[in-house]
Amino acid sequence: MEKELITVVVPCFNEQEVLPLFHEEILRVSDGMTEAHPQLEFEFLFINDGSRDGTLDILRKYSAEDSRFRYVSFSRNFGKEAAMLAGMEHSKGDYVVIMDADLQHPPKLMPQMYEYVSSGEYDCAATRRVSRKGEPKLLSFFSRSFYKVINKISQTQIVDGAQDYRFMTRQMVNAILDMPEYNRFSKGIFSWVGFRTKYIEVENTERAAGKTTWNFWKLLMYSFEGITAFSTFPLAFSVIFSILLFIAALVLMIFAIAELSEALAVMCLICFVGGLQLFCMGIMGQYLAKTYMEVKRRPKYLIGETEETNRKER
């Protein structure tokens, strides 16, 4: 019987409180899958994204006790996008699973995801939140608004509520790795590659332990990253606003003639034009900044330690 290897990629940032719970649950689920499907083998690849707590010490302990547990530790915090990329690049499996360590991505769904993908009908199985229970209402409003906006201005359609929890074939992973861009927005990349995806609807799940590092500001900047990564529509604002400005100028001119208030018309026009110019320059500056980062070709992450280098040092 030909063996099939599943690599479970787990980005980690300050997860010392939840890692023991995740370790217990992922072993329970993977052992059940190998019992039901004897051809399956697992490796667990943790990406330590510059954690400042005891996360790395726990990962060292797991890898020393069980050879299936591997880790890649960054030299500093590079962000979740870099962690997911590193996990896919260092994965060895015929299938690759990306999931968070906080148990908001329930490992118990893996058997169902495997069935969908191994059937050959799908290349990927992913989860999609159908409710935002427990999430602040303002954050939920902006999250839903983001999906509506980006799906209107981009040719790449992103499913509302789609999560990073994914079970993918090696073919799909290789296609993602063929996209070497520095400014990465994985939700868009997963959709752009165009493989057949089965979405499993799930309720919002709270963290099992620890505190999230995401906040409104980080999510807002992440949404800007997605819009500029998969749409050039904001660059068209200058053209649209120039037309609106021309119409506004005509209206102000008529108003000034009718009211004999040239000073008011001139002041309004100057403020409007100045604000519009700064706004358009800001949009173009964002795209220019991203181009600047791309052409410098800096590495997307730097590795400080892996389980292999740690064994050699000992």
Image (tube, rainbow, N blue to C red):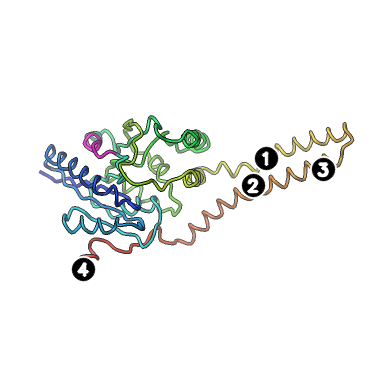
Q: From this viewpoint, which residue is outermost toward the right?
A: 260
For the residues labelled 3 and 4, the Cα–Cα distance comes to 73 Å
Q: Position of residue 23 (x, y in %)?
A: 22, 47
Magenta span includes 13: no
Magenta span includes 114: yes
Q: Quadrant of residue 53?
A: bottom left
Name the N-terminal-most of marks 2 and 3.
3
Pointer 2 with pointer 3, Cβ within 8 A: no
- Residue at 56% from the left image edge and 54% from the top image edge: 288
Pointer 1 with pointer 3, Cβ within 8 A: no
Question: What residue is pinned by disc 2?
Answer: 280
For the residues labelled 2 and 3, the Cα–Cα distance comes to 21 Å
State which mark lies toward you, 4 or 1: 4
Numbered tag placed on residue 312 in the rendering: 4
Name the N-terminal-most of marks 4 and 1.
1
Pointer 4 with pointer 2, Cβ within 8 A: no
> Which range of residues does the magenta coloring cover?
106-115
Front position in the image: 191 or 105: 105
Q: Secondary structure at mark 1?
A: helix
State which mark lies toward you, 1 or 3: 3
Pointer 2 with pointer 1, Cβ within 8 A: yes
Numbered tag placed on residue 30 in the rendering: none
Question: What residue is pinned by disc 1?
Answer: 241
Q: Quadrant of residue 129?
A: top left
Name the N-terminal-most of marks 4 and 2.
2
Q: Secondary structure at mark 2?
A: helix
Q: Position of residue 115 (x, y in %)?
A: 22, 34
